[in-house]
Amino acid sequence: MTAMLETKNLGISFGGLKAVDGLSLKIEKGQLYGLIGPNGAGKTTAFNLLTGVYKPTMGNFFLDGEKLTGHNTIEINKKGVARTFQNIRLFKQLSVLDNVKVGLHNDYQYGTAVGIFRLPAFFKTEKEMNRKAIELLEVFDLAGEKDYLASNLPYGKQRKLEIARALATSPKLLLLDEPAAGMNPNETQELMDTIRFVRDNFDMTILLIEHDMRLVSGICEEITVLNFGTVLAQGETSKVLKDPEVVKAYLGD
Amino acid sequence: MKNLNNMSKTTKKNMVTYGIVLAMFIFCVVYTTTGMASHLFKGLLVPICVNVILAVSLNLTVGILGELSLGHAGFMCVGAFVGSVFSMVTEETITSVWIRFPLAFLVGGLSAAIIGLLVGIPVLRLRGDYLAIVTLAFGEIIKNIMNNLYLATDANGVHFAIGVEAYNNITFDALSKKVYINGAMGITETPNDSNYFVGFALIFITLIVILNLVHSRTGRAIMAIRDNRIAAESVGINITKYKLIAFVISAFFAGVAGVLYGHNLSSLVATKFDYNYSILILVFVVLGGIGSMRGSIIAAVILTALPELLRGLSDYRMLMYAIILIVMMLVNNNETLQMYTQKWFGAINPKKFFDAAGSKKKGKEGVS
Amino acid sequence: MNFLSYLISGISLGSVYALIALGYTMVYGIAKMLNFAHGDVIMIGGFVVFTAISSSATSPAIAIICGIAVCTLLGVIIEKIAYKPLRNATPLAVLITAIGVSYLLQNIALLVFGSASKNFPNIFKWCPDWKVTEGLTVSGVTIITIVVTVVIMIGLTLFIHYTKPGTAMQAVSEDRGAAQLMGVSVNSTISLTFAIGSALAAVASVLLCSAYPLLNPYTGAMPGIKAFVAAVFGGIGSIPGAMIGGILLGVIENLSKAYISSQLSDAIVFAVLIIILSLKPTGILGKKISEKV
C-alpha cells in the first residue's frame, strides 16, 4: 500500500543555511501525524515545501504515490493538499460563509458570465455551495455565525474557520500549522475532539505542527521531531517523547 | 429557509442601490419635463451619468480587487475615441441610431478592455505600487498618442499618422478627403447621440454587471485575493486570472463611459482625459467609501454637480479633492483618529454615512 | 559627433533622475512605501529657489540652501502628518494618501504661483562650456550636474556604510521589528530618510530647472515618475541601482528623442518600465522581496 504522504530526503537551503535538511517521513492514509521541534527547527518551512510556497532544493515528496515536487501552490492544492497558517490568514472582509465558499471554488464551478447574467446554473450551484458550506461550518460549530465578518470572530473560532476553509477544498491531506496556538485548555480539548472527528468522518490524513505537548501526545499516533532542520527522532509518539535526545533538544543542556 | 433569507439580504441592499438610481432618474424626468430645469442642470445630466459609471467601475478595481489604477481616464479616452470614430464611420451605413449607438458602446468598451488586458498582464503579477505607476504612465501615453494621432480617409483609402509632420507628408485626394481625428484638435464632428436616458440605462447595466459579479463565485475569488493573496493561493485560486478579470471589466466600463462622453459634446480632445480626471474618479471612490458602490454613485453625483452649481468653489476644487483623499484615508485607517472622530461625530465613516440602510447591523458583509 | 553630445546630455539628464530616484529608493527600502509626492517636493524646491533669487538680491548659493532647508523640512512634515499615522494601514491606504499629498502640493503651488511657467534663471553662468572638439560642446550645467551627482553618490554611500545613522537605516530596511528590538529608533530613522531624500530632491530641482528652465506646478510630476521608473530599473531599494537606472533611463530618453520621435519619448520610457517589469521585476541590482508565509 502506498503512503498518503511520503517525503524522501526533502530539503531546502537559503543561501548557505539548510532550513530543512533531508526530511524523510511516511504518513499512512487516515493517520494523525505530528511534526514537532523547537522554534526555528524548520517545521513551517517544511509545510511551505509541501504546499509549493518554496521549491525544494533537494529530495522529493509524493502524495498518494504521485510525485508533487516542483508543482506550484495552486496545483498542489488541486492535487489534494490543504493547509492552515501559523498566523491566521482568513479573508477578513468576507463573511464566515463566504470564506468557506472560497474554499469550494474549484469543486463547484460556473463561469464568470454565468454569474454576471444570473443564468440558472448560478442559482443551482450557489445553492449547493451554501448547503455544503453550512454542513462544514456545522462541524466546527460556526453555522450560527455564518453571516459575521471573519475578522469579527473570536480567535479560537478563526482558527476553526481556517480548518473549515481548508477542508472545503476536499483535500486528501490536511496540514495544520499550530492549530492550538493561543487557545486555552478548554478550547484545546475541544479542538482535539474536532480534529479526531475530522479524521474519522472525512476520512482524512492529518499532519500537524504543534507546541502543545498535551495535544500532540493526546491525538498524534506518530511524530517526527525536527531540530536545526534535521530529523532528531521519529516514530510512535509516546516512545519518541521519552527519547533523551528529544528531551535535551527541548529543555536544552 | 435561512439560506433564502441570506440571499435576499444582499439582494435587498442591492435593491436600495438600484432604487436610489431609479429615484434620481425619475426626478430628472419630472424636473426636465415640467420645464423647471435650467439649461445648466440639463447640461450636467450626461456628465453626471459618465462620472457615476466611471466611479462604479473604478471601485471594482480599488474596492473589490484592492489595487490602485491611476489610468482610468486613459481607458475612458480609448473608449471615447474608438466609439466616436465608429459612429462617424458607420453613420451612413448603419442609419438606425438604435443599432449604431449600442454597437459604438460595445466597440468602445471592448477596445478599452483589450488595452486593459495588455496593460494588466505584465503588471498584475507584481506588487500593487507598480500597477499605480504603470496605469498612470499608460494614461499619459494614451493622452500623448491621441494628441498626436491623425486619421483620415480619401479615395485612396485610410491614412493615419502620428505627429503633425508625418500627417503633412501625406498627399490627399482633396475632393474625397474626410478627417476623423485631427491631432491635438481631436474629433470635431462626433454625432450627439448621448442623452440622460441612455446615461441612466448604462448606469443600470454597469451596476447590474458589477454587483452581480461581486456576489458570485468570481467576485468571491477576487475579494479573497484582496484580503489575503497567500491564503487564496492555498485554496487553489488562480491569482492572475481573477485579478485580470476584475481589471478588464473595470476598463471595459471606463471605455463605455468614454463613449457616452464622446457622444455628448460635438468636439473631443485628448487633453481632457488627463491625470486630473483619473484623480477625480479616485476621489469619488474614496469619498463614497472604498468598496461601496452606492457611496461611489452618491459621491460622483455630488462632486460633479456641486462645483458647477457653486462656481465660486472652482478655484479651490482640486485643493479640496486632495484634502478629501488625505483626510479620508487618515480618518478611516488610523485607530487613534478613528476613536476621536467616533467620540465627536458619532460615525463619520462614509461607508456607514452613505450606507444608512445597511449600517445598523455591525459585522455583516458589506458590499452595497 | 552628434551621437556623443546626445549621449552626454542623456547622462546629465540621467544624473538628475538618479538623484530623484535615490529619494524613492531609500524611502521604499526603509518605509516600504512609494512616496508619490517626491516629484512634487522637487517642484516646491524649484519654486523656493526661484522666489529667493528673483524676489530679493539673494545670491544663488543662499537660495539653494533655502531650497534644501525648505524641502528637508517639507519631507519630514509630510512623513509626520500623512504617513506616520498609517504605518499599520494597508498599502492601498498609504498609496492613496501619498497621491493625495502629491496632488495637494501641486494645487497649493497652482494657487500660489499660478499655472503659467516661470523662467528659471541660469545660476550656473560662471561655469564655462567645455569645447571638447569642433562640433561637440558640453555645457556648464551638464558638467556641474554630473559632478554634483557623483559627489553626492559617493557621500551617500559612505554615510550609509560608515556612520551610525546610516547603519541604522540599513537595519530598519532589513527588518524593522528586529532593529527596534536592538534599540534603533524606527521613527527617527524613517524621518531621517525622508529628510535626506527631500534634501536630494531640492538639489535635483536646481539641476533640473537649470537644464530645463521652465518651472510650473507640474514640473516635478513627470521627472518624478521617470525617476521611479529609474529606481525600478536599477532595482528598488538599491542605491547604486538608482544611479545606474537613472543614467540608463536618461540616455534611453535622450536617444529616443533624437532618433525616434520627440513626442513619443515618454511613451518609450514607460514601455521600458513595462518590459523590465515583465522580464526582471527586481531590476538590475534588486534583491528578491518575498512575502513571509
Image (cartoon, rainbow, N blue to C red):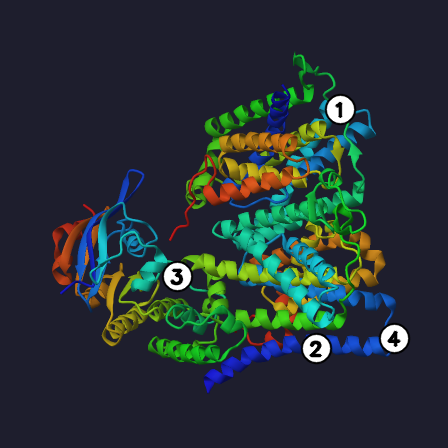
Q: CA distance from mark 4 to mark 3?
A: 59 Å
Q: CA distance from mark 3 to mark 2?
A: 43 Å
Along the line of sight, which residue is nearer the eye, A75 or B20?
A75
Q: CA distance from mark 3 to mark 1?
A: 59 Å
Q: Residue at x 77, y 26 (%)?
A: C121
> Which quarter of the figure is the C terminus of chain A placed in?
top left
Nearer the observer, disc 3 or disc 1? Answer: 1
Q: Position of residue C68 (x, y in %)?
A: 67, 31
**Residue marked by disc 2:** B22
Q: Are marks 3 and 2 in contact (CB under 8 Å)?
A: no
Nearer the observer, disc 4 or disc 1? Answer: 4
Q: Which mark is residue C122?
A: 1
Q: Residue at x 41, y 62 (%)?
A: B237
Q: Secondary structure at mark 4?
A: loop
Q: Residue at x 40, y 66 (%)?
A: A155
**Residue marked by disc 3:** A88
Q: Is residue C17 left or right of residue C177?
A: right
Q: Residues within 10 Å of mark 1 (few under 14, many from 20)?
A: some
Q: Position of residue C220 (x, y in %)?
A: 68, 38
Q: Secondary structure at mark 1?
A: loop
Along the line of sight, which residue is nearer the eye, B41 or B283?
B41
Residues indicated by labels 4 and 1 sit on the same polypeptide chain: no
Placement of A94 over or under C281, stated as above or below: below
Q: Are marks 2 and 4 in contact (CB under 8 Å)?
A: no
Q: Are marks 4 and 1 in contact (CB under 8 Å)?
A: no
Q: Position of residue C266 (x, y in %)?
A: 64, 39
Nearer the observer, disc 4 or disc 3? Answer: 4
Q: Chain of mark 3?
A: A
**Residue marked by disc 4:** B36
